[in-house]
Image (tube, rainbow, N blue to C red):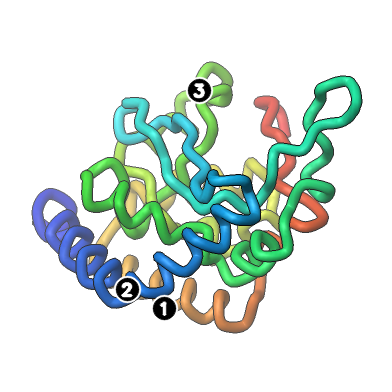
Amino acid sequence: MYTLFIKRSLDFSISFVLLIFISPIFIMLIAFLAIANKGKPLFVQKRPGKNEKIFKIFKFKTMNDRKDEHGNMLPDKDRITKIGAFIRKTSLDEIPQLFNVLKGEMTLIGPRPLIIEYLPIYNNTQKKRHNVRPGITGWAQVNGRNSITWKKKFEYDVWYVENMSFLLDVKILGLTLKKVIQKKDVNLSEEQTSEYFNGSN
């Protein structure tokens, strides 16, 4: 009952209320990022969702598009703007994904949607993470996020899919808020991003 009906209703209701409540902050961040990124406040990228259906994920754009003399993008650490660094540290870059939740493409809590390039290299067990909608936060995020191995992340994701419940979602939400407040295991993207998954790590 929870996974079929209640979870989606809660996702929609909570996301709708949150967007109304934080709309002043949302508009302010849009303005600052538009200035910092030459009119491009949002990062949009295709990601696989439930049943590997492709959708466009929305995030605040925290890096500019600066290139070197050869036309290649500069390293991440050289492209992160000051406002972008602050937004990533506080995890505010995830706010636009509330629109993905409203559209039914994502859920508040579930396995994080990864890049399309990983799809061909998942094993059968890892593919189970796509049996549910991807989430803004999840079991792997509250158990280490970028500080754990890909193998462990996928183990956490699959475990969540097989044990999803209202109480587990409440626990993950509480742990997420705690980590954001403490700035613990948050992706400090000024220096690094996640290691690329190649199917063996």
Is the residue marked by circle 2 packed among few (<14), some (14-19), or many (20+) residues within 10 Å?
few
Image mark count? 3
- Say which quarter of the image contains residue 82: bottom right
Residue at x 62%, y 62% (from the top left corner): 88
Q: Earlier in the sequence, mark 3 or mark 1?
A: 3
Residue at 52%, 81% in the rendered image = 178
- x, y percent for residue 177: 47, 77
Residue carrying label 1: 174
The reply to whether callout 1 and callout 2 are in contact (CB within 8 Å) is yes
Residue 165's x, y, as percent?
26, 62
Viewed as shown, does residue 28 lie left or right of 87? left
- Disc 2 is placed on an element classified as helix
Type of residue at label 1? Gly
Rendered location of residue 85, percent (x, y)? 70, 63
Secondary structure at numbered mark 1: helix
Tag 3 and tag 1, C-beta contact below 8 Å = no
Q: Is residue 72 above or below residue 177?
A: above
Disc 3 from disc 1: Cα separation: 30 Å
Residue at x 39% of width, y 72% of height: 173
In the picture of the structure, the residue carrying the numbered disc 2 is 170
Reading the image, the residue beneath label 3 is 119
User: Which quadrant does the N terminus fall into?
Assistant: bottom left
